[in-house]
Image (spheres, rainbow, N blue to C red):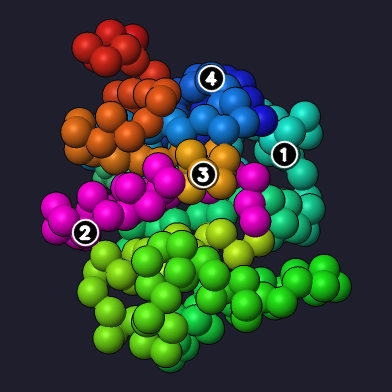
Amino acid sequence: MLEIRNLTKIYGLGMVEVRALDDVSFSVATGDMVCIMGKSGSGKSTLLRQLGLLDRPTSGEIILEGEAVAKMSDGARASLRLRYLGYVFQEYALLGELTAHENVYLPGMMLRGRGVDFRQRAKELLEIVGLGDRLRHYPKELSGGEQQRVAIARALINNPRVIFADEPCANLDTVSSKLVMETLVNLNQEMKATIVFVSHDPDDKKYGRGLIMLSDGKMVTEDGVV
Ligand SMILES: Nc1ncnc2c1ncn2[C@@H]1O[C@H](COP(=O)(O)OP(=O)(O)OP(=O)(O)O)[C@@H](O)[C@H]1O
Ligand SMILES: [Mg+2]
């Protein structure tokens, strides 16, 4: 489904170089739930952004369902992102002037001509994440955990092949974190969604069935060996 080959990302070429990703290779099979872990600054968000087509690697390649995507045009990448990928940000990134329901269905409206009733689908997705009774609430009227579950529902509106989640629980208390992680596990197990998530909490390893450990941009074993 997803193959990552010798991925390297260097920031600030010319001035102070930061090798945020250094020759990272691994693959993600359909239906996997992979956890990316590592200390702050180890390159987790950088890696997820490359995989989610939000940024381009300095070198290396990403193969998404057989297609090399690293060097594709911006337009082609945006189209792939819209049709096949879902992304959940640490800070939710909901639009404050829209209700939970609108936040979820509006991105779907960008996928014209598919004959899908996105309003209805958004309602069903919000029910799946346990927020069927919060459709008309605005983000500021929701708890952090509820906002993150709205963001997860939004990431699902295009029926993505892969869902990426960057520290989805970083701003949440333990109870909400558990709910958000269990929501992701359910999506993986029941809807067979392929999920790649980032966490810095070693406890979250249990939610993944694969583990990618990063240290200074390099893949290491769980004990930190390169
Ligand atoms: N836009 C950028 N320009 C220059 N350097 C950057 C940029 N983004 C990240 N970095 C550097 O790249 C390295 C990896 O950053 P990244 O955000 O991927 O870490 P992270 O593992 O997600 O950390 P955290 O757990 O704190 O979110 C860090 O040293 C960071 O300072
Ligand atoms: Mg990060």
Quadrant assignment, res 141? bottom left
Disc 2 to disc 1, C-alpha distance: 35 Å
| Residue assigned mark 4 | 25
Count how many numbered circles sit on residues in the image. 4
* 142 with respect to 190 (left or right): left
Q: From the viewer's side, name the closer residue of 3 and 134.
A: 134
The residue located at (25%, 36%) in the rendering is: 204
| Residue assigned mark 2 | 176
x, y percent for residue 155? 53, 60
Closer to the chain start, of discs 3 and 1, is 1
Quadrant assignment, res 22? top left
| Residue assigned mark 1 | 69
Mark 2 neighbour density, 10 Å: few (under 14) some (14–19) many (20 or more): some
Closer to the chain start, of discs 3 and 4, is 4
Q: Residue furthest top?
A: 225
| Quadrant in the picture for the N terminus | top right
Q: Amino acid at mark 3?
A: Glu
Q: From the viewer's side, name the closer residue of 80 and 176.
A: 176
Ligand 1 has an atom within 8 Å of the beta carbon of the residue at disc 4: no
x, y percent for residue 99? 44, 87
Residue range highlighted in magenta: 159-186
Q: From the viewer's side, name the closer residue of 142 and 164.
A: 142
| Residue assigned mark 3 | 190
Q: Amino acid at mark 1?
A: Val
